[in-house]
Amino acid sequence: MRTGSVDLPLHTGQCPPWLFERMTRLSRAILVLLVREQGRQAVLAKLADPFWFQAMGCLLGFDWHSSGLTTTVCGALKEASRGCERELGIFIAGGKGRTALKTPQDIFNYADKYALSSAEKLVYASRMSAKVDNAAVQDGYQLYHHTFIFTAQGNWAVVQQGMNTGAKRARRYHWLGDKVDDFVNEPHAAICCDRKEKTVLNLVARESEENRSTVAALTSLTPEAVTREYTQLVLPSRHSLYEEHLRPSSLERVLLQTYERHPQGFEALLSIKGVGPKTVRALSLLAELAYGKRPSYTDPAKFSFAHGGKDGYPYPVNRATYDRTTDILEQAIKEAKLGREEKLQALRRLQHLFTDDHPL
């Protein structure tokens, strides 16, 4: 399983209601089928795979290369799971814009309603995945969408997207909880993308380990000592952060907060409210230039249609075919629940036609 991010061009417009309604219905059938056939953890693993997720968007009739695929597919999945959470054992929180900010409350609401015991850990995972991709991986993309998918057993996955308004592109980030041994050391099993930025401050790279440790150690010094060293530095031209971007007085206020907390390590520092991209970047530069601990500046970023695309590419959505596909899946699931597995077995045999062992 290789998880990570995919770059997407920004597209304007909205998903037409007639298509979103179909996307929701088909998504529900797919979720029910996947949970039944492969289990809840397999659903999380698939959503954490950027290529599978992209193909899912194509299957649902959305534009394969549109930034809107992320928000619309996540929205359809969330709507599809509504009312089916107990049957699926899968819960979907968050969304786009202000809805993303409600993710912690969504998680606590599900925990109260379904007597889940891991709400605090899930909220922490949600917040840290967003904090890492917004502050520890500084690639020029500001997060504006965050969807958190989890199970009653406490397993989770994240699909979130950032926007670079200058480049008019979006970048999607995927996380899979079972693959995260450390939130600040290679938390993405892989990051896939069709466009790499020339310079990215990647503090969760393995090569950044010494820089992370030094950054954490700096927060144990008095704020005055850190800001004094920072103001004496002459930053090389390759860096995009200058003293006017982060005033020493502002840095000192944040450092006072971290000094009082004495965070044990970089992850603890990153989890502190108020420690954002500018503070992290300033401390990382200080760790590099004053102490020789260089971080990674390498960008970590590394289809097919079933029913057409909403903008008519490669061809318009065929509504009759779309509805027929959904009908087949729903009927197969209904009959399987009654003990008649023939149609599901036929779908399984169809799948084997496209494996390496059974080439067409």
Image (cartoon, helix red, strand yellow):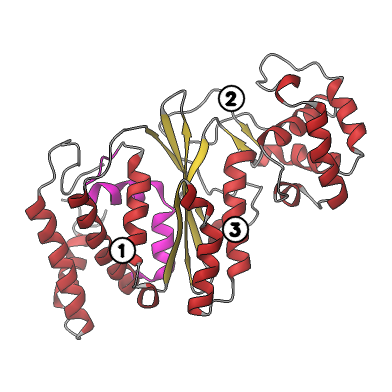
48 falls in the magenta region? yes
What separation in Å lies between label 3 and label 1 (alpha carbons)? 23 Å
Pointer 1 with pointer 2, Cβ within 8 A: no
Q: Earlier in the sequence, mark 3 or mark 2?
A: 3
Give the residue type that dot 3 points to.
Ala
Q: Which tag is nearer the camera, tag 3 or tag 1?
A: 1
**Which corner quadrant of the image does residue 293 belong to?**
top right
Residue 302 among those drawn in magenta: no
- Regarding mark 2 in the picture, which secondary structure is present there? loop
CB under 8 Å between discs 3 and 2:
no
**For numbered disc 3, what is the local secondary structure?**
helix
Q: Position of residue 247 (x, y in %)?
A: 77, 26
| Residue at (60, 53) in percent of width and height | 127
Q: CA distance from mark 1 to mark 2?
A: 39 Å
Residue at which label 2 appears = 199
Name the amino acid type tagged 2: Thr
**Label 1 packing within 10 angstroms: few (<14), some (14-19), many (20+):** many
- Mark toward the viewer: 1 or 2: 1
Residue placed under numbered mark 1 in the picture: 80
Prevalent SS, magenta region = helix
Residue plotted at (26% across, 40% down): 63
- The residue singled out by tag 3 in the image is 125
Q: Quadrant of residue 338?
A: bottom left
Give the answer, above or below, for where 220 lies relative to 180. above
The percent position of residue 360, horizontal first and vertical second, equals 15, 50
Question: Magenta stretch?
Answer: 38-64
Amino acid carrying label 1: it is Ala
**Horizontal side of residue 132 vs 212, given as left or right:** left
Q: In the orientation shown, which residue stands out farthest toward the front?
A: 98
